[in-house]
Image: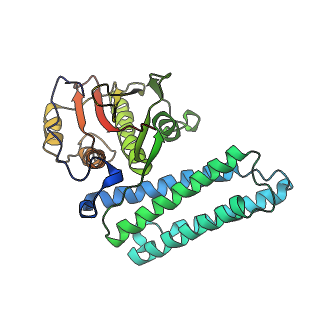
Amino acid sequence: MRKLSAVQMPPPVRMGSRDLRHRAPKEDLCLPTKMREPLFHFTRHTLNNSVSSMLALITLPNLPDQQRSELIRGILAEYSSLRKNLNSGSGQLSQMQAAAEMQEFFLRLQRRFVFTSETDAFESDEEKQAFSRLINTARVQLDKLLGILNGDPYRQFPEKVSLFRLIGDLMPNPAEGTKHHVYRYPETQPVFLYADRFDTALVLENFFSNAFRACERKGAFPFIEVSAFIQEENPKMAEITIRDKGIGFKTEELLLIRSRKGFTSKDSEGPDHGIGIQHCRFLIEQHGGILEISSREGDGTDIIFTMPASTA
């Protein structure tokens, strides 16, 4: 990883195996208490996105439009009913029951439209495969949520992940009122990670959210540059940089991050800053990566971190 100017991050504290495929049982992760609620909220958010994407894939070309609309509305109503009990105030037992019932809900959808469908539900095999992948991802996320609620060691499920495709899925749609530009470089060299998709998405979304907010506080157009490449000196790791032109961190704020403490930006109405960064650091380090931050007050921030690269 390149040496950066400004305030540097300290060497990471290693907590677990660098290779997630060979993690020993004694190396199970203990999830910090402060991380449980953010992960819980993120699960609900990603489940909503997964359901929206799944329903968009179900075309049912052999059914009349009215029957198809009624079927989709029924699925959405069932999901909405289950999701109500996943709210924070429902109580732990109710949340666990709701998560288990939602896992069964996704399994029924997979059986109905992928394994035992009497009517073609999709226009192509590619759409059917995409639907099944979304189902499997949602079930893994719910399995993680059940573990969190039950106080079990935090589990990770590494797989091959297309970094830039994941970035595209996470970016808000400008048509929905969010004006921004994300410049990905290099476009011609896709990077694949061997990482937990849920953890990777959580890290990226946190960093993107901070970058957007930093640009808004400065009154600047939210222009964010994302670059990634496989390290020459260590081909097993990918280096990712997220650069914004926002308000930047003050020196004292960087020192708090360096000491692994959180802080609240007094002139910001958004969520606390540093706590989220520490969550990201935790997840990055569980993958054997490291995090560095270089920031120029009033002139933006560079977030640089490494994650395991897929060599397949």
Residue 306 placement (x, y as % from top left): 30, 36
Residue 15 placement (x, y as % from top left): 21, 52
From the viewer's perspective, tell me whether residue 187 is left or right of residue 199. right
From the viewer's perspective, tell me whether residue 169 is left or right of residue 230. right
Looking at the image, the residue that sits furthest to the bottom is: 93
From the viewer's perspective, tell me whether residue 103 is left or right of residue 37. right
From the viewer's perspective, tell me whether residue 5 is left or right of residue 127. left
Residue 252 placement (x, y as % from top left): 13, 35
Q: Nearer the viewer, residue 98 or 177?
A: 98
Residue 31 shows in the view: no
Check the image and report above or below for 12 versus 245: below
Q: Which quarter of the figure has residue 112? A: bottom right
Residue 278 placement (x, y as % from top left): 24, 47
Q: Nearer the viewer, residue 281 or 299?
A: 281
Q: What kind of colouring is applied to the model shown?
A: rainbow
Check the image and report above or below for 268 versus 241: below
Check the image and report above or below for 239 versus 43: above
Which image quarter holds the N terminus?
A: top left
Residue 179 shows in the view: yes
Total number of numbered labels?
Answer: 0
Residue at 29% from the left image edge and 32% from the top image edge: 303
Residue at 26% from the left image edge and 29% from the top image edge: 248
Q: Nearer the viewer, residue 162 or 170?
A: 162
Check the image and report above or below for 150 versus 302: below
Q: Which quarter of the figure has residue 67? A: bottom right
